[in-house]
Amino acid sequence: MEEAIMKVCTACEKARPLTEFNRKGKGWRAQCRHCDVAYMAEWRKANREREQTYNAAYRESHQEERKEAFKQWYDRNRDQQIERSKQYRIQHQEVLLQKRLERREAERKRYAQYRQMYPGRCKTTRATYRERNREKIRAKGRIYHANNRERIMHRKSAHNQTPRGKTVRRIIRQRYLARKANAPGTFTVVQFLGRCDYYGWCCYW
Ligand SMILES: [Zn+2]
């Protein structure tokens, strides 16, 4: 039986058979194949990190140029990009909706937590905001209403078919008639709804 020729690796310093060394020209590499593999992996990793650092630094120092270049590119490809976004939204409709709902739910939870932590503050903050931005809110509402007229009307008429909706319509009409007859005393919708809850939503008149 022929004995395998051994060679000591300069890296791991282990004696290994020649078959575990790569060739180098007519001879052999000083390191064994295992050490070569480990070394290459290490080298690639270090290089990747260096490249990433370099790229990040480049992006940082060329922000304005990159912005400008992107703008020009976008101007050339605008229609195509808009179409692509549209297709993406259509194809990922369900996932996007799911994400939206999750975000909304998280937001709701966060807000509830905040309300619990600072009772009363939200109410005051909201009231102050509304007070300060009355005109802005109204303008926004008008625009929204104009853009969603159909949807709002549809929603309203659907609501009018519900027991609560029907009751509200009735109250509004009664209050209108009372005002017309110049009758003293009135009640708010909220007060009336409280009474309706009390009577279990059945007609009591
Ligand atoms: Zn080795």
Image: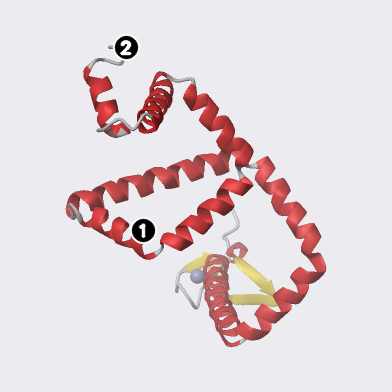
The residue drawn where x is 74% and y is 53% is 84
Which of the pair 6/21 is nearer the observer?
21
Which of the pair 170/196 is nearer the observer?
170
In the structure shown, which secondary structural element does the residue marked by tag 1 occupy? helix
- Mark 1 near ligand 1 (CB under 8 Å)? no
- Between discs 1 and 2, the one toward the N terminus: 1
The residue drawn where x is 63% and y is 37% is 150
Q: What residue type is labelled 2?
A: Cys
> Callout 2 environment at 10 Å: few (<14), some (14 to 19), or many (20+)?
few
Q: In which quarter of the image is the C terminus?
A: top left
> Callout 1 environment at 10 Å: few (<14), some (14 to 19), or many (20+)?
some
Q: What residue type is labelled 1?
A: Arg
Look at the picture and state if 162 lies above or below 152.
above
| Residue 199 picture quarter | top left
- The percent position of residue 163, horizontal first and vertical second, equals 40, 18
- The percent position of residue 23, horizontal first and vertical second, equals 68, 72
| Residue 177 picture quarter | top left
- The percent position of residue 187, horizontal first and vertical second, equals 27, 32
Which of the pair 99/27 is nearer the observer?
99
- The percent position of residue 88, horizontal first and vertical second, equals 68, 48
- Mark 2 near ligand 1 (CB under 8 Å)? no
Q: Are marks 1 and 2 in contact (CB under 8 Å)?
A: no
Query: Residue 203 bears which disc, if any?
Result: 2
Q: Is residue 27 left or right of residue 132?
A: right
The residue drawn where x is 60% and y is 36% is 151
Distance CA(mark 1)–CA(mark 2)? 37 Å
Q: Mark 1 points at which residue?
A: 130
Look at the picture and state if 34 lies above or below 1.
below
For the view shown, which residue lies furthest in the front direction? 182
- Disc nearest the viewer among 1 and 2: 2
Which of the pair 6/46 is nearer the observer?
46
In the structure shown, which secondary structural element does the residue marked by tag 2 occupy? loop
